[in-house]
Image: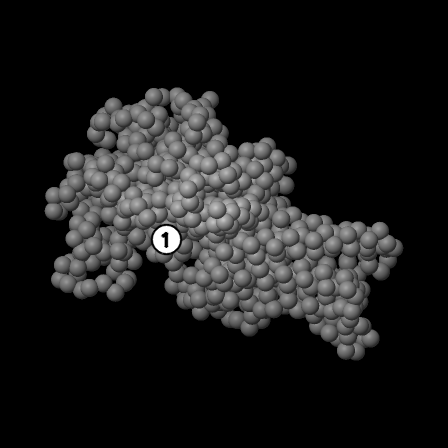
Amino acid sequence: MLLTIIYNIKRIFVQTISIIFPNVDQVAENTLYFPKSPMTINTPIYTNITKKCNVLETYTINHKKMETSNQLNSFKHMRRVVFNRAFALIYSIAILTLLYHHAITIFYSTTIPSLLISLGILISDLVLAFMWTTTQSFRMRPIVRKEYLENLKNVVKNEQDFPSVDIFICTADPYKEPPIDVVNTSLSVMAYDYPPEKISVYVSDDGGSKLTLFAFMESAKFAKHWLPYCRENNIMDRCPDAYFASNYPVTSYTEEIKMMYESMKSRVEAVLEMGKVPTEYITSEEEDRAFSKWEQDFTRLDHPTVIQVLLEVGTDKDIVGQSMPNLIYFSREKNKAFPHNFKAGALNSLLRVSAVMTNAPIILTLDCDMYSNDPTTIKRALCYIMDKSIQESLGWVQFPQIFNGINKTDIYGCEHKRLFQLDPPGMDGLIGASYVGTGCFFRRKVFFSGPSLFLEPELKELRPDHVVNKNVTRQSILDLAHHVAGCNYENQTNWGSKIGFRYGSLVEDYHSGYKFHCDGWKSVFCNPQRSAFLGDIPISLSDVLNQNKRWGVGLLEVGFHRYSPITYGVQMLGLLMSLAYANFAFWPIWAIPVTIYAFIPQLTLLNGTSLFPKVSDPWFLIYAFLFLGAYAQDFLDFILGEGTKERWWSDQRMWIMRCVSSYLFALTELLAKNLGIKTHGFNVTSKVVDNELSKRYDQGMFEFGVASPMFVPITMASIINLFALGGGIFQVLFGGGSLDGLFGQIFIAGFGVLNSIPVYEAMVMRNDAGKMPIKTTLISSFLSLCLYVTFSIVMKFM
Ligand SMILES: O=c1ccn([C@@H]2O[C@H](COP(=O)(O)OP(=O)(O)O[C@H]3O[C@H](CO)[C@@H](O)[C@H](O)[C@H]3O)[C@@H](O)[C@H]2O)c(=O)[nH]1
Ligand SMILES: [Mn+2]
């Protein structure tokens, strides 16, 4: 009796705790603990807890099956949740206190300039507070998942019962995305440890280039050797370039394969250099026929559809007689009169063409530079997709974007740890990780509205349940495929709005994933120890900043859309999840506070005016806490996410640089767009490796080199901060200024200077091709002077 009472008291206590902190380890403990008690899992109280959790009900229950051998996956809540929540509470009180302080300052400001400056600071802090609030969504319920690959064979007994997979690889420009790299990506996925007849690889070439087609003709031949080689030797690096760069065992056969690879590579590169495919490289009539589609008036923006089946399941065999997967080269029709909607347009064409040709229930989308680094990845994704308990609403399984070739300190913050590794587990604990454009396994159903609502496509052949039982080379199939790849096919249809990937944003990945979540789908973030995919990063600063500007424009397009996360999303996804989406959507508005803080405290300091409370004033503590608290928590997240302190420093520095350039330009570009001024579209990031540049990058040197307007605000901020720091110290030492009053500004200027070290080096200390162009230095210096003079005049005479 007594035992039962104690037991029940303990149970209620545990439940209360888990209601207050629903996702702390108690939930996981519950699922293991309660089954031992006489209560069953369906008791009302238990259901109540899972309801309160409001997330992943099925997933929580699923966790219980852990010990059985049919268990395909499990998840666990991260321990830092309690700390995160407590800290969020304290931090929000501090924010409110600060805002109160601002209100008072504004109320008592006596002159117009001081009022304007106070308003500027208030706006900055409001934006920072808003963005801080949105980031809390990632910190409230982060989870980690685990897959039990070894149990998959208990669930799918026969390899033949595995679902087929259509793999989409996008490329857009042979000169920015070398075809040999695209070939490597495709070989790495064709060689998946998976029945080859269940794999179809579609290469979408938005560049409409016969150089790329040629590369794939070559790769189809090489694949017949490569696939059996990978299988027989059970190698992990199935991307040939990565394999031959690794420490592979040298045998005569391996050397033979390597020779074949090298000779293919040199042919592909030679063709790229010549800019055409010479006749001696064309070995069959069929190849000749394929190239004949490139007639005189064929340009990348105006050409008919090209679909070339390079390998066909059942017909083509590798050198040991095993079937090859399908390999299909595809370039959709383009015509200047029709919008082609960049990558989203390419993906939607791929969706239709693949539906007609193979219609696999699972789709993997890949960028051309993201090769597979683990042959078991499809099976790993199946650990979720085949899990009956979550299958119903599971829309996709997203793997993180992890990159190759990042230098030691990641000077450009290209790892994007927060975006690709730290934030997704936070969203995963809510409804699911967002889609990041590559390394993502979708269920085909996702593209036709929600889990419980099906939107009928125009043709029955495009339905996800349509069975294709004809060869991909059958004329009727090819005719229909050409029809659905036509550039006017989407006129008057739901494609791009209600069906498929969504148009209207340059970050079609983020935008589409957001739509799918709003439609009711859930998703999973799968982050195995060995990276499933490895991609390339840009290694010059202007490429990095331009990429981020494109993302910025794309994100704002969603943020200020009719379906913005803060208006529509909040109704569909709930508060936390919509805040997570809002965080991304509004990244670029960080430009406002960061730009203000990069110039205003410094300019006022140069004018000898104090802006922040004195160090001896208790209000100063609020500032110090807010600044240090945010930085410390960010640092902690980064380190707990297996980051180094050097990379964290680069990450925060790049964040500042992006804010004053990429995001500022993105805000301007969006404004221009709304005023009807034509802006850039999807500017593809170059993946070409320049040896000199790459050497400098490996040494950790910033690459300026070209005179990009994007460098101007960065350089101006560097100059002004340096002068402000010098001026501030001078005033304190010789000019009678008080350190007590000016400390805040001197500190900010000092912080700016520390972050600007690479800029000073590039301006005055370097002589290599990556130094700051003299033009940029001159323009920035001149503009800084103008800014200083104007600001001083306004301060003195208003
Ligand atoms: O008109 C186009 C433009 C681009 N692409 C392809 O899109 C992919 C991504 O382009 P990239 O220049 O590498 O952009 P990133 O900024 O590196 O890519 C990130 O951001 C994009 C959205 O801006 C997402 O599509 C990507 O998946 C994501 O990795 C590449 O494979 C391109 O070939 C097309 O197929 N058609
Ligand atoms: Mn890319």
The type of residue carrying mark 1 is Pro
Q: Residue at x 69, y 64 (%)?
A: 624
Number of labelled discs?
Answer: 1
Say whether residue 103 is left or right of residue 397: right
User: What is the residue that sits farthest to the front in this orientation?
Assistant: 1
Q: Can residue 423 be seen in this view?
A: no
Q: Residue at x 41, y 54 (%)?
A: 402
Say whether residue 725 is left or right of residue 68: right
Residue 787 image-quadrant placement: bottom right
Viewer-proximal residue among 702 and 594: 594
Q: Which residue is drawn at 22% across and 40% down?
A: 157
Image coords of residue 752 (percent x, y): 64, 65
Vertically, is 285 above or below 657? above
Q: Which colour scheme is used?
A: one colour
User: What is the residue that sits farthest to the bottom in this orientation?
Assistant: 734
Q: Which residue is drawn at 35% across and 25% down?
A: 463
Vertically, is 787 above or below 463? below
Say whether residue 40 is left or right of residue 186: right
Image coords of residue 370 (percent x, y): 36, 50
Which quadrant: the C terminus? Answer: bottom right
Under circle 1, the secondary element is loop
Q: Is residue 17 visible?
A: yes
Image coords of residue 796 (percent x, y): 85, 60
Quickly name the residue at label 1: 528
